[in-house]
Image (spheres, coloured by chain):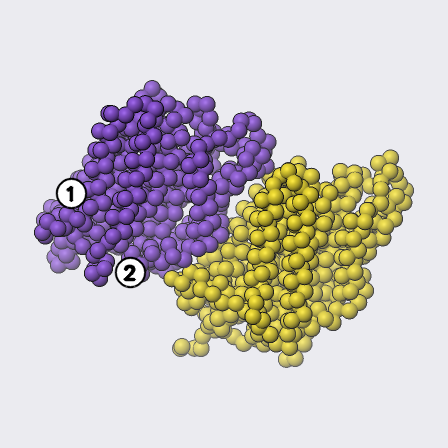
Amino acid sequence: MNNSNMLLAAPELWVLTMACVILIVDLFLREERRGIIQLLALGTLVFAAIITLRADYMAEGLRSVTAFNGSFIRDPMGDVLKLFSFIVLALVYIYAKHHLRQFRMFRADFYTLSMFALLGVMLLISANSLVMVYLGLELISLSSYALVAFDRDSPRGSEAAMKYFVLGSMASGMLLYGMSMIYGATGTLDLQLIADSIGSNGGDNTLLIFGLVFLVVGLAFKLGVVPFHMWIPDVYEGAPVATTLFISSVPKMAAFAMAIRLLQTGLGSLQDDWSQMLAVLAVLSIVLGNLAAIAQTNIKRMLAYSTISHMGFVLLGLLPGTPEGFGAGMFYVIVYSLMSAAAFGMVIMLSARGVEAEKLDDFKGLNQRDSWYAAIMAMVMFSMAGVPVFVGFFAKWLVIKAALDAGLLWLAVVAVVFSVVGAFYYIRVVKLMYFDEPVTEAVIDAPVDFRAAISLNGIMMLGLGIFSSSLIAICMASFGA
Amino acid sequence: MTSNWPILSLLIWLPIAGGLIVIAAGDQRAALARLLALVFSGLTFILSIFLFAAFDTSTAAMQFTELKPWIETFDIFYSLGVDGFSVPLILLTTFFGVLVVIAGWEVIQERVHQYMAAFLIMEGLMVGVFAALDALLFYVFFEAMLIPMFLVIGMWGGPRRVYATIKFFLYTFLGSVFMLIGLIYLYIESGSWSILEWHQLPLTLAVQTWLFLGFLAAFSVKIPMWPVHTWLPDAHVEAPTGGSVILAAIMLKIGGYGFIRFSLPITPDAASALDWLMITLSLIAVVYIGFVALVQKDMKKLIAYSSISHMGFVTLGMFIAFAVFRNSESGRGAALGVEGAMVQMISHGFVSGALFLCVGVLYDRLHSRMIADYGGVANTMPWFATFAVLFFMANSGLPGTSGFVGEFMVILAAFQANFWFAFLAATTLILGAAYSLWLVKRVIFGEVASQDVAVLEDINAREALVLGTIAVAVLLVGLWPEPLVNLMHASVDQLLQHIQQSKLPLAGG
């Protein structure tokens, strides 16, 4: 454990540095030159991606390396998730800038906060000890609370932030409680050592399972799965779209990684126990998320419930405890983040003159107003519904296959039946865009970078679907499947 | 036989690429969009003629095969190939691909580029369904096809189009997800997605039964069979003419094709054990839906119900084989049944497509599909009346038209299985004639019913071209079915040989 290990955390250190730099640079910038912040942030992401890609340990033929006394780990899964965090966050920045400008909220705080949240995401992804998990998680959460309340004058935003904060703190408390019990049972915080200790002691693990329950509760809250989903619709609706865009995409990848670290690395030998818990959570989320989404008239709320059901699908991939299942879950969560970014990007695009386009009716007749953006939104919706050949289909297909592999036929049947239920509200958006007359003729206008990004994001739905081979291979290889 | 250039890929991707180019033509240049659509669908049709010409009818093996890795991690291949079952259906698809473009030429005035593009893309996807030999690839085409049809019905359809199209989409989507579970199960069992390899895979009867039911969920909705047919009348009534034509002429056939490609060869023992179910449902469709068709007031609805009834013949012809085998060793009747089902599918494609076009012709003039609004059309539209009467005759199975051949073959086969099957099936000759001819009497003949009918203009050259082409096809298949039957003969024989052998694993093994 020498100091050169620090270099393994180079991407994290770089992001931390740049978050501080952005904070300071902003002090010296005049209002009209704030665009520089955006460039700085995007540059940070690009460079972070470059140093993440320089994964020397892989050249040495290692599957993973640890640093900081084993509390930090670099492995292919972490690197891939980090890279996609950068990509999605870059999309978020491009979409968010347009929104922030329109609503006169274009301040550097958004970038600093989300940069710190990104740091939390990266730490959580690379966490190899309970302390690191907790640190990463809190860094994300605290930044997110502030981001939700970013629009200071919005009572809805403040209410959402308050709710998020109270419920989030409770979840963190649960998680800590669970961690303390795991520590009590095993005497270590290092996830690898926890696994070894469980493997060697055998016998009674009541305390461990007690701890596990609380861990799963904390995890379920962060993923936002039923019955720990209450905060999701309110926070998604109350927060400014730019924030919703962020919290619905990047942190989900971290939550997935957290599940892998805690459940697979740490408590892999309790798989029988946690997979039953996850099965309940997954079924409830898929059923309730899809049913509740039907009743929504606000697209942010609809997408919130859709998120809940998508996270249920991710759990479906996790619960068989097989490398292939983990790979499927990883593919799902990456794809979900991209889909979610595009969907909220479209909400931002349709917002005009200081009013968020958050009602479903705002999408009416989009095809007649602008057929290209209607096509993008349609692709995103079909992808979320899991219709081939869009990438969302392959994500659903992989997790269903993982469930079937593990002999969980009933879970697979529930999943497919409710994905048909889900298809209803997704194609309803398509119906609004294509079959209804527009309620407004307002020209859809957005900066060039926004239009390029959302077009790329939309084409990804189709492109990643047709050419899903390599991404699937990467995800599977991350777990050695 | 295996040509060096990928003709099947071209048949799939040329219309899809054409569709994208047509979209790029934009809303303002409708004439250009129409022209481009015609060029691309025409080229595709010509290509399919080459396919037909180069097809070797002496073998049941897959021809023009293409194989490229697609998703290697899970052994999924971009695998294409055609046999005697797929070639006629591909020809039917490309044939109607051209006709719907011409049929929508003047009728569609709004968002022409999107209309044409939707049909071109749909054409490519449907060819893909018929050519795919990899189950996941098949599923992708099978499902993706729903999207353009969903948009076509919803954007250019009638007053209740939204209800109809969402029902159509969800119904078929729900059916096919069960198939997806079955497909994944087969992959887990066999380690391959190749449909042909699955044909050889031994499976226990219990597993086969579940798989069979999974396939049934997908294909019975698509074809459709009673009692999961209710989406069809709605979809047909609300769809624009072109949409109805494609729906009736080709999409329904995908259900029948699915039975031949999946249900029969992959789960023959379950199909044999459950053939009573299939025969019962088919006969209910033939007889009961025939009566339902009789009382319809809406022409499109009547044709829709008549389609369901005719599709009952298709499923009957396919699943009668097992009963024939039990009765006799020769199995000649079984071949008649399957070939009859195939001929019936092709013939019904022509006839129902033509009938929907006929209704479209009337609808474009009077904006009504109600039988009661018409009467005496023959007086003002003699040419139209000629074609319409021909197609309705074909629909009721008049000898000399294509409608007769398939039905007759299936009834003959049914005789070898059970007299009562044949008896019930044969009632369609009466029922079909009843609802078809009664409609002809009320709409075409008689006194001129109203002022509106009196001023009707006869079909123009474009409509005459469309209807005339199909009329030739209907008569050709009716008088000289030989080439069509030859095309599929080898494949039918092989299929029947295959399904006679049990796929149950040997005892103790």
Left-right relation of A441 to B210: right
Q: Which chain can be seen in purple?
A: A
Left-right relation of A26 to B95: left
Disc with the residue nearer the chain's start (2 vs 1): 1
Question: Looking at the image, which residue is at 58% across and 71% down?
Answer: B3
Provide the chain ID for the residue under circle 2.
Answer: A
The residue singled out by tag 2 in the image is: A480
Q: The disc labelled 1 sits on which kind of residue? A: Val
Q: Can residue A216 be seen in this view?
A: no
A291 w.r.t. B87: above or below: above
Same chain assignment for discs 2 and 1: yes
Q: Position of residue A34 (x, y in %)?
A: 32, 27
Left-right relation of B206 to A66: right
Q: Which chain can be seen in yellow?
A: B
Q: Which mark is residue A131?
A: 1
Quadrant location of residue A142? top left
